[in-house]
Structure formats: structure tokens, C-alpha cells
Image (tube, rainbow, N blue to C red):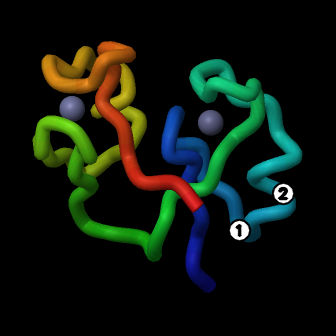
């Protein structure tokens, strides 16, 4: 079974309804927002191109190119 990840905090869920029904501490609307695409071995910031094996590691850091200041991933 594939897992789905929140693009903002890296929270993992077995399906999208379960993911989007949960509260997210980092997303702009307060809910987890699914990462666009399947589970990957590395995730790449949409703005600066930095890579990490974990979404949660990258979203904890600051992005030099995103106007909001955080690394960001494509969302559904
Ligand atoms: Zn989240
Ligand atoms: Zn970045």
C-alpha cells in the first residue's frame, strides 16, 4: 500500500481523506495537504532544489528562495 505525505509537515497517512482531515501545524489552511506524487526516496524543494529523504526534515529548515521563507513541495 502506498503512503501519502503532507507536503508541509511530512505527516504520513495510508489514504488522502485521513490525511486531509487531520490538523497540520505548518500548512496555510491548518490541515494536512497531500504531497503531489508517490512516495519517493528523496524529496526536492520546489523553490531552491535542495533534496532530503524526509519531508519533515526539509520543512523544518528555511528556504532562501521561497518568499514565505520555508522549503516547499508540490501539493495536490
Ligand atoms: Zn501537515
Ligand atoms: Zn527551498
In the rendered image, the quadrant that contains the C terminus is bottom right
Residue 71 picture location, percent across and down: 30, 30
Q: Which residue is mark 2?
A: 18
8 lies above or below 68: below
Q: Residue 63 bears which disc, if any? A: none
| Count of picture labels | 2
Q: Are marks 1 and 2 in contact (CB under 8 Å)?
A: yes
Of helix, strand and loop, which one carries label 2? helix
Please give left or right for residue 18 compared with residue 64 in the image.
right
Q: Residue at x 57, y 79 (%)?
A: 2
Residue 25 quadrant: top right
Q: Residue at x 21, y 21 (%)?
A: 63
- Taking the image in four quarters, ligand 1 sits in the one at top right
Q: Categorize mark 1 by other alpha carbons within 10 Å: few (<14), some (14-19), many (20+).
A: few
Q: Give me the C-alpha separation between circle 1 and circle 2.
A: 7 Å
In the rendered image, the quadrant that contains the N terminus is bottom right
Of helix, strand and loop, which one carries label 1? loop
Q: Residue at x 17, y 24 (%)?
A: 65
Residue 59 picture location, percent across and down: 37, 29
Q: Residue at x 61, y 55 (%)?
A: 34
Q: Residue 14 bears which disc, if any? A: 1
Amino acid at each position: 500500500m502506498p503512503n501519502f505525505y503532507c507536503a508541509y509537515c511530512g505527516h504520513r497517512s495510508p489514504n488522502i481523506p485521513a490525511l486531509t482531515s487531520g490538523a497540520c501545524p505548518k500548512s496555510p489552511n491548518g490541515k494536512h495537504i497531500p504531497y503531489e506524487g508517490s512516495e519517493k526516496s528523496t524529496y526536492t524543494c520546489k523553490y531552491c532544489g535542495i533534496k532530503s529523504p524526509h519531508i519533515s526534515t526539509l520543512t523544518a529548515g528555511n528556504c532562501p528562495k521561497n518568499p514565505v521563507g520555508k522549503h516547499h513541495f508540490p501539493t495536490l
